[in-house]
Image: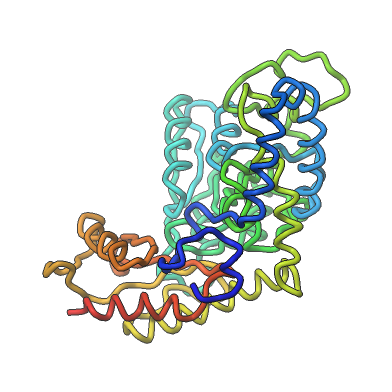
Amino acid sequence: MSVPLAQHWNLDSQQTFLNHGSFGACPREILEKQGSLRDHLERNPVEFLAFQVEALLNESSHRLAGFLKAPASDIAFVPNATHGVNAVLKSLRFAPGDELLVTNHEYNACRQTLDHVAEIWGASLVVADIPFPIADAQEATSALLEKVSPKTKFCLVDHITSATALVLPVEKIVPALQAQGVEVMVDGAHAPGMLNLDLAKLGADYYTGNCHKWLCSPKGAAFLYVQPKHQEKIHPAVTSHGRNSTRKDISRFHEEFHWTGTSDPTAWLCVGDTLDWMSHLLPGGWEQIRRQNHELVCEARKTLCARWETPPLCPESMLGSMACIQLPEMKVGGVPLADGSTLASPLTHALRAEGITVPVISWPSPVGDMVRISAQVYNSRPDYEHLADFVNGLRV
């Protein structure tokens, strides 16, 4: 990572880090801010947690709400997007025979939550197979809508798929499903900071997203957006004091979600500062960050596809700041790399030994094994050339 901006992160300068998508990376200055907040907390934990933190959380949530273009009253902090999905799904009530809709690209942790909830209520899980490779966004919309029936009550759909890095057309999917009486939750784990969000305009019933990924906040910062008409029925995954509170100066929604027991709230409190700090990193602010990352990942994908002689798996219009590239035939440790997760592991270890951090993902035929690259402001073209060269050295 030779880009001057990399100096703001604690990432190992000897590593080629192409996996911002998995857990993000927090700038040094924000980590120092979090450390200062922790010091303040520990100087008087009772004063901080009992008397100060509520106002600080309110300020942070208002700053985040402005960035997401949604009322602060409709947004609550959660530790991560998986918590957000769990909170919604485990609050809702279904009946035997109800259908819950999801795509074959859904993040495994959230898919498991959906499976579990369907089992509890005797509901049926319906999976829409979105093709991959994919020619255009309409294929995704059509695949999902074709699975809707009069029994469909709920749909969980990714904004950006984790395994395949596709930006799905949720602005079309959400209203189309709602028009048929389906409540829609968007799993936007990767979207904040990667895409220009307008949650009020999107109008999803529920939306959850991480702040520790593309916003670069500390780990443990995420949010859940719930439309006002649903807030009375949605509760956090952990029940605590807020459930029977008689306070009138704070919403039940916020009181339940923002206090589920003793925890470290400093990641949430850093979100507003992270938004401001990142907005001054480039002259064009967040718009330039999103554009620059998108352009870099598109350029990197072209380079890798050309070097490995593999086809692009989706149009550039369905990419944000990540992309999946099909791997060529190769040998790792003298063993051919075949389709399937079993033989993807040796490549992962070989990449780690080379100092390249990038996920290796297996997808059903005809794709097989692929890598998912990320582009953040600390990345540069040589990072992807390093990956290209290493893989080419393993080709059959």
Whole-percent x, y for residue 275 in the image = 73, 56
- The image quadrant of residue 371 is bottom left
x then y, percent, for residue 375: 53, 69
The spot of residue 110 in percent (x, y) is 48, 42
- Of residues 111 and 292, the one nearer the viewer is 292
Q: Residue reaching furthest left?
A: 334
Q: Name the residue at 61% across, 63% down.
A: 8
Is 31 above or below relative to 99? below
Q: Is residue 148 visible?
A: yes
Q: Is residue 320 visible?
A: no
Number of numbered callouts drawn: 0
110, 352: nearer the viewer: 352
Q: How is the image coloured?
A: rainbow
Q: Residue at x 47, y 56 (%)?
A: 162
Can you say whether 86 is above or below 246 in the image? below
Residue with the most extreme right position: 249
Q: What residue is at 28 percent from the left and 63 percent from the top?
A: 353
Front residue of this view, candidates 207 and 329: 329
Q: Quadrant of the C terminus?
A: bottom left
Q: Residue at x 56, y 75 (%)?
A: 3
Nearer to us in this view, 305 or 277: 277
| Relative image position of residue 216 (x, y in whole percent) | 61, 55
